[in-house]
């Protein structure tokens, strides 16, 4: 992967703050011509640095269900065991984020479920059946304070 320069980092900062910012406004904010800015953004998208755009929906606007933070500990931390787990977690649509961690757990997941019963299904049918899982610890979020 190519190193990001200061212009790339500026583009990412602005888009993280406002993903709907027009190319003209973005170009003006970082001091590029609109065509040069668009080329940079398209290159960041092509390289997978920018993986997509999404809308962040306010709490209460739609029934979103519950967010569960799940800590996963694997039986072994070999490259093969981690690869197999990561492949399985990518196939689980309820897992919205997955992070390889330092510390007591190997992975932390953000899981979205309709309710506690739905999470029980996800836990039983998906998470506990993923390869190499030794321990699962779950915590239900009470409310989101910062979300992005």
Image: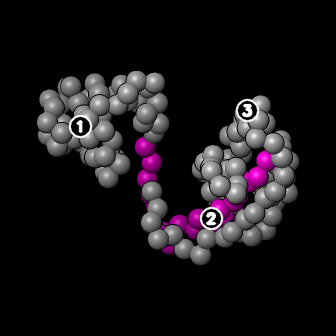
Give the x, y percent position of residue 30.
18, 39
- Answer whether residue 98 is visible to the viewer in this image: no
Report the side of 114 relative to 15 (left or right).
Answer: right
| Residue at 17 percent of width and 43 percent of height | 29
Which residue is at a point 63% across and 46% down the rendered structure image? Answer: 100
SS category of the residue bearing label 2: strand
Q: Which residue is mark 3?
A: 79
Label 2, residues with CA under 10 Å away: few <14, some 14-19, many ≥20:
many
**Residue that mark 1 sits on:** 23
Find out whether the residues at labels 2 and 1 contact each other: C-beta distance under 8 Å: no
Residue 71: percent from left, percent from top: 70, 58
Q: Of residues 61 and 20, which is closer to you in this image?
A: 20
**Residue at the spot x=73%, y=38% of the render?**
82
Image-based side of 29 in relation to 45, left or right: left
Farthest residue to the bottom: give it. 142
Display colour scheme:
one colour
Find the distance from the CA under tag 2 to the CA under tag 1: 34 Å
Task: Check the image and report above or below for 12 versus 128.
Answer: above
Q: Which residue is mark 2?
A: 67
Q: Write down the region rendered in magenta.
A: 53-74
């Amino acid at each position: 992967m190519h190193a990001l320069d200061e212009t790339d980092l500026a583009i990412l900062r602005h888009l993280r703050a406002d993903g709907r910012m027009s190319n003209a406004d973005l170009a003006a904010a970082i001091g590029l011509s609109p065509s040069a800015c668009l080329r940079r953004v398209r290159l960041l998208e092509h390289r997978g640095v920018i993986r997509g755009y999404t809308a962040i929906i306010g709490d209460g606007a739609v029934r979103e269900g519950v967010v569960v933070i799940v800590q996963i500990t694997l039986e072994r931390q070999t490259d093969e065991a981690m690869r197999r787990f990561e492949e399985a977690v990518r196939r689980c649509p309820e897992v919205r984020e997955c992070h390889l961690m330092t510390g007591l757990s190997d992975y932390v997941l953000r899981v979205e479920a309709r309710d506690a019963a739905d999470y029980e299904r996800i836990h039983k049918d998906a998470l506990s059946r993923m390869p190499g899982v030794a321990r699962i610890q779950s915590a239900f979020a009470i409310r989101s304070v910062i979300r992005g």
